Image: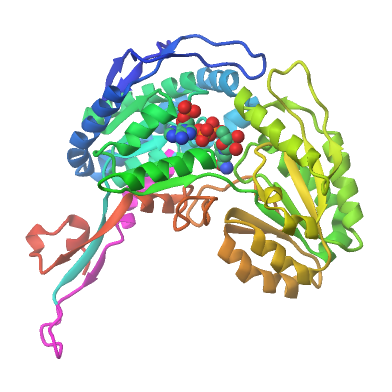
């Protein structure tokens, strides 16, 4: 497909009239063709209004049609093959195997949600039949199911240009729920966004769905993104990005005459707790495994292990030695964009400038890369960590801080200091279980996923996964953005009381 740089407004290709945007290859610094023109608030209005018009007919489509629609987006993405793999690499610097893996995951997510729609149980139908003789009051016939919220605004993520972007998890779950989607493309990968939007738009047409079911806008977050979230037709928002961006959009949503939910995934340092027996039994191997997780995706994954709470015990030195050797052996790799690289360097420099922090290992640098991400490993004491909140801030990239915790009894106080997280990981060995059992309730209050003797990176997309967590991991910790439960974010319950069978929705009429 030839890239044209045009917006997708309810099935039409339209040249934007805003400022110019060109993608940059973060490996070389080269700007890429074509020139994109950003959308304006008028385009936002057109897309959101068309989405509102599409909502009722789209949500009433036969679930079979909606499932086929999702499957055909999956087919279309898979068919893009080399074209999309190459464009993603050029716009993000993500290594080819990871791009292929992400493409497969995105295709599978769409198929997973097609299965959810076919299965139908996502509507959560519940039935309480009438009890006319109940005393003191008769019970009415009550039936409940969930309905879609309305048009959803999706913000593409810089670090998952496929799986969390134009046809990623937010879009797949919203479309599955019966909600039209308006995507605000991430400005660092407009070409990838255009390719995927072409596939979604073709699938909308092929299934005779209302044109407003899907639109794609390019634009400045502060103008186009804000206008989209503020638009009266938009009913919910899915976002992955920075804490500043996510909280700004939550504020916009809350300031509307009719506030709407924003599901923003923002900042997480994913603490890893190392207990004494794990360190004693396999300290070095844990150190090596930790760095393998830390350097995955050049550390630009929301689940990257940015903080290690290691109990000061025999074996800790083995861990540090193994980790430091792995860090020194790690190669520099391109970061997603010059902006993200600059923010990373700033975060690393702040740790270097902190007198309570020691840098124990640095990975190789690579001057030939325009936006090189180098691995860094730091240590500090629990005392210093408790004194200085800045040490618990996300440094987005392959940098991690090991906190030496004097004993297992000091772990709860350190964990208490940490904000909400997507994940927490515990490494334990023989005899560590009682300590772990004491920690679990506190971890459960802090995070969305608890991992034992593994690593937080690598999120399995399925029925039981949770990718969410208390603020600031997400703006609403009651949900997940990955896995089948993600559909819940775009639904709300409605009860039918004493409604005759002839008027009941199909899923409620069928329940005995
Ligand atoms: P970002 O700056 O938050 O941008 C994400 C999206 O939100 C973009 O479309 C952006 O628009 C828009 N946006 C940003 N600020 C906005 C505002 N105030 N009002 C309305 N829209 C706004 O995130 P990013 O570009 O992906 O990366 C920047 C930093 O985010 C990283 O360095 C990292 O710290 C963090 N990050 C975290 C995660 C995570 O999962 N924890 C993932 C990705 C990034 P524009 O197109 O105008 O930029």
Quadrant that contains the C terminus: bottom left
Location of residue 189 in the rendering, given as x and y in whole percent from the top left corner: 51, 23
Quadrant of residue 359 in the image? top right
Q: Residue furthest bottom?
A: 135
Q: Which residues are magenta?
A: 110-139
Give the vertical position of 28 relative to 373 (above or below). Answer: above
> In this view of the protein, can residue 157 be seen by the observer?
no
Residue ID at (53%, 42%): 243
Quadrant of residue 196 in the image? top left
Nearest to the observer: residue 511 or residue 223? 223
Give the vertical position of 276 relative to 6 (above or below). Answer: below
Location of residue 115 in the rendering, given as x and y in whole percent from the top left corner: 38, 47
* Residue 132 located within the stretch drawn in magenta: yes
Location of residue 401 in the rendering, given as x and y in whole percent from the top left corner: 76, 47
* Residue 186 located within the stretch drawn in magenta: no
Residue 378 lies left or right of residue 175; in this view the side is: right
Q: How many marks?
A: 0
Residue 333 lies left or right of residue 30; in this view the side is: right
Nearest to the observer: residue 343 or residue 26? 343
Give the vertical position of 127 relative to 32 (above or below). Answer: below
Residue ID at (13%, 86%): 137
Residue ID at (83%, 38%): 327
Residue ID at (37%, 51%): 489
């Amino acid at each position: 497909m030839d890239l044209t740089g045009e917006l997708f407004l309810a099935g039409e290709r339209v040249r934007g009239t805003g400022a110019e945007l060109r993608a940059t290859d973060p490996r070389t610094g080269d700007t890429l063709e074509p020139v994109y023109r950003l959308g304006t608030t008028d385009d936002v209005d057109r897309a959101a209004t068309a989405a509102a018009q599409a909502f009722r007919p789209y949500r009433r489509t036969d679930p079979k049609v909606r499932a086929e629609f999702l499957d055909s987006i999956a087919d279309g993405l898979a068919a893009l093959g080399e074209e999309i793999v190459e464009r993603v690499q050029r716009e993000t610097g993500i290594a080819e195997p990871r791009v292929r893996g992400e493409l497969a995951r995105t295709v599978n997510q769409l198929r997973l949600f097609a299965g959810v729609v076919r299965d139908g149980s996502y509507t959560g139908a519940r039935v309480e039949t009438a009890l006319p003789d109940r005393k003191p009051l008769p019970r009415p016939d009550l039936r409940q199911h969930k309905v879609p919220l309305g048009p959803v605004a999706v913000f593409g993520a810089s670090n998952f240009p496929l799986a969390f972007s134009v046809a990623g998890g937010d879009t797949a779950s919203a479309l599955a729920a019966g909600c039209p989607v308006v995507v605000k493309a991430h400005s660092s990968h407009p070409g990838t966004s255009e390719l995927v939007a072409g596939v979604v738009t073709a699938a909308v047409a092929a299934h005779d769905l209302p044109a407003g079911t899907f639109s794609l806008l390019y634009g400045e977050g502060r103008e186009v993104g804000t206008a989209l979230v503020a638009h009266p037709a938009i009913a919910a928002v899915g976002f992955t990005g920075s804490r500043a961006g996510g909280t700004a959009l939550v504020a916009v949503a809350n300031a509307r005459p009719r506030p709407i939910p924003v599901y923003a995934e923002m900042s997480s340092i994913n603490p890893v707790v190392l207990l004494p027996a794990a360190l004693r039994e396999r300290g070095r191997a844990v150190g090596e495994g930790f760095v393998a997780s830390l350097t995955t995706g050049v550390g630009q994954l929301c689940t990257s292990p940015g903080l290690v709470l290691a109990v000061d015990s025999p074996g800790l030195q083995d861990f540090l030695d193994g980790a430091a050797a792995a860090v020194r052996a790690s190669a520099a790799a391109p970061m997603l964009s010059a902006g993200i690289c600059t923010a990373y360097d700033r975060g690393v420099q702040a740790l270097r400038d902190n007198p309570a922090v020691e840098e124990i290992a640095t990975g190789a640098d690579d001057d030939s890369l325009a936006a090189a991400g180098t691995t860094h490993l730091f240590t500090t004491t629990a005392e210093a960590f408790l004194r200085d909140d800045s040490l618990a801030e996300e440094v987005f990239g392959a940098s991690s801080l090991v906190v030496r915790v004097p004993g297992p009894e000091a772990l709860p106080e350190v964990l208490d200091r940490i904000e909400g997280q997507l994940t927490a990981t515990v490494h334990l060995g023989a005899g560590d279980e009682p300590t772990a059992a004491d920690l679990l309730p506190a971890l459960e209050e802090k995070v969305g996923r608890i991992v034992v003797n593994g690593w937080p990176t690598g999120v399995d997309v399925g029925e039981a996964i949770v990718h969410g967590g208390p603020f600031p991991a997400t703006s609403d910790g009651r949900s997940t953005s990955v896995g089948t439960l993600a559909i819940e974010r775009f639904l709300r319950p409605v009860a039918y009381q004493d409604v005759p069978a002839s008027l009941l929705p199909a899923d409620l009429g069928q329940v005995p």
